[in-house]
Image (tube, rainbow, N blue to C red):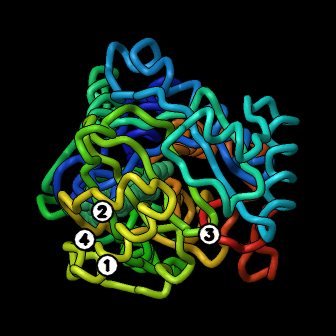
């Protein structure tokens, strides 16, 4: 997704001599398994600005991307918290509103008006974003790819990058499975494999890969109705509708980041214990799901940095760039990220005011990005 959005945005700047290489097929990495939720609840000014750009982009995807579709489904977003999380949540909402995001605080009573199936007795407050929703990640990737290709970019699938070609300290291109491709600029947008790909350039990225589990639960027949995406900072789950009669449930546990895995060899299924845990948590929040059933489960992976924010930077040899470490946010931010990477390549770090925040050196400087929730996952 990141590479395709960057390629698309480069072509929109008139830079058409772009090649996107994928060792598999488009969306065969983390993107293909993404829940593709586009909520706006962020707690730094930079990510709030990025999500505003991105949501607006998804809402007008067909106009922006030459008739492409991102499958955007408008649902609204509801987040509930207990007293422990009340202050950081309220501070985040204030920040979001100051940046123009349409969000508001809601009481437990209002939450039940918005979604009557919710249990709210252990929630003290929440917030609601009317405009948020979710997309289809494969449609979105295809949309970017087709538009970039129509504008002159080449998309080469089944074509792994095996090494970086250098001339002194300058990037000269890449060695691929099918031969060398000369290019003065190389962007590493290899997602789960980005640290491995960076090593080819002698660059060490503080990114590790962890497993992220999804359970798809069937609603009892009498309860099958649309609902907002519900995020729950008490049981630490997120949910969204899935194909009418199901609800998708993902974890928001910091613990997941300790489940480090090899992206080429990890448990892609979800065990009985894991799905039982997901069902218990979601039926706590939606009591009607005590009668629900696990329909399906799968796991994908996140590429996680120490502060759960991406790296967007020029690093290592001249002409070498990194856009990786999306830590579970890379779908919803992808339009803004593509826009920023195109600016970085075309104009350098001054090309976009928020780029310096995402520099790699912040980790060595001891200045990780910290939002209202401190280092708590995903916000
Ligand atoms: C289960 C799950 C749920 C998620 N839910 C959400 C969500 O609700 N909202 C959200 O915003 N984000 C979500 N995410 C995260 C989001 O999907 C990712 O951050 C995003 O899709 C990453 O896109 P990417 O292009 O950076 O990486 P990837 O999709 O991993 O793409 C990287 C590509 O690089 C290719 N590649 C790797 N090595 C090489 C090589 N040597 N040569 C050539 N090609 C190579 C791979 O084949 C791959 O296609 C979720 C992720 C998962 C797994």
Q: CB atoms at circles 2 and 3 under 8 Å apart?
A: no
Spatial CA span between label 4 and label 3: 33 Å
Rendered location of residue 163, percent (x, y):
30, 71
Q: Earlier in the sequence, mark 2 or mark 3?
A: 2
Which residue is under mark 3? 377
Nearer the observer, disc 4 or disc 3? 3
Give the residue at mark 1.
274
Number of disc labels: 4
SS under mark 1: helix
Mark 3–mark 1 Cα distance, whole angstroms, equals 20 Å
- Name above or below for residue 62 compared with residue 344: above
Label annotation for residue 215: 2
Residue 343 in sight here: no
Residue 344 image offset from top left, x and y in percent: 63, 45
* Residue 100 image position (x, y, % from top left): 80, 29
* Residue contact at pointers 2 and 1, CB within 8 angstroms: yes
Q: Nearer the viewer, residue 130 or 27?
A: 130
Residue 76 horizontal side relative to residue 356, left or right: left
Q: CA distance from mark 2 to mark 3?
A: 19 Å
Q: Earlier in the sequence, mark 3 or mark 1?
A: 1
Location of the C terminus (image quadrant): bottom right
Viewer-nearest of labels 3 and 1? 1
Q: Nearer the viewer, mark 2 or mark 3?
A: 2
Q: Is mark 4 within 8 Å of ligand 1?
A: yes
* Residue at image mark 4: 162
């Amino acid at each position: 997704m990141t590479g395709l959005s960057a390629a698309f945005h480069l072509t929109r700047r008139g830079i058409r001599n772009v090649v996107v290489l994928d060792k598999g097929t488009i969306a065969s990495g983390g993107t293909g398994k993404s829940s593709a939720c586009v909520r706006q609840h962020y707690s730094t000014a930079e990510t709030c600005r990025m999500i505003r750009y991105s949501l607006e982009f998804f809402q007008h995807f067909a106009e922006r991307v030459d008739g492409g579709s991102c499958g955007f489904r408008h649902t609204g977003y509801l987040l509930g918290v207990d007293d422990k999380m009340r202050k950081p949540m309220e501070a985040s909402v204030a920040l979001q509103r100051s940046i123009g995001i349409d969000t508001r605080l809601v009481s437990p009573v209002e939450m039940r008006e918005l979604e009557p199936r919710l249990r709210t007795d252990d929630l003290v407050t929440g917030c609601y974003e009317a405009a948020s929703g979710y997309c289809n990640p494969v449609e979105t990737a295809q949309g970017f790819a087709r538009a970039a290709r129509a504008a002159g970019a080449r998309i080469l699938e089944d074509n792994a990058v095996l090494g970086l070609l250098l001339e002194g300290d300058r990037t000269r291109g890449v060695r691929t499975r099918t031969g060398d491709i000369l290019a003065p600029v190389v962007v590493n947008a290899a997602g789960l494999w980005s640290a491995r790909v960076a090593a080819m350039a002698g660059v060490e990225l503080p990114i590790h890969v962890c497993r992220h589990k999804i359970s798809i639960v069937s609603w009892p027949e009498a309860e099958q109705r649309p609902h907002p995406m519900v995020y729950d900072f008490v049981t630490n789950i997120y949910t969204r509708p899935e194909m009418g009669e199901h609800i998708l449930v993902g974890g928001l546990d910091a613990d997941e980041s300790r489940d480090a895995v090899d992206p080429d060899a990890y448990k892609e299924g979800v065990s009985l214990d894991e799905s039982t845990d997901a069902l218990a948590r979601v039926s706590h929040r939606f009591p009607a799901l005590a009668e629900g059933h696990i329909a399906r489960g799968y796991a994908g992976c996140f590429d996680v940095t120490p502060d759960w924010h991406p790296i967007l930077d020029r690093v290592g040899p001249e002409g070498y760039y990194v856009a990786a470490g999306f830590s579970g946010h890379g779908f919803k931010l992808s339009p803004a990220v593509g826009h920023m990477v195109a600016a970085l390549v075309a104009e350098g770090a001054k090309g976009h005011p928020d780029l310096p925040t995402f520099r790699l050196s912040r980790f060595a400087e001891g200045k990780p990005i910290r939002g209202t929730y401190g280092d708590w996952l995903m916000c």
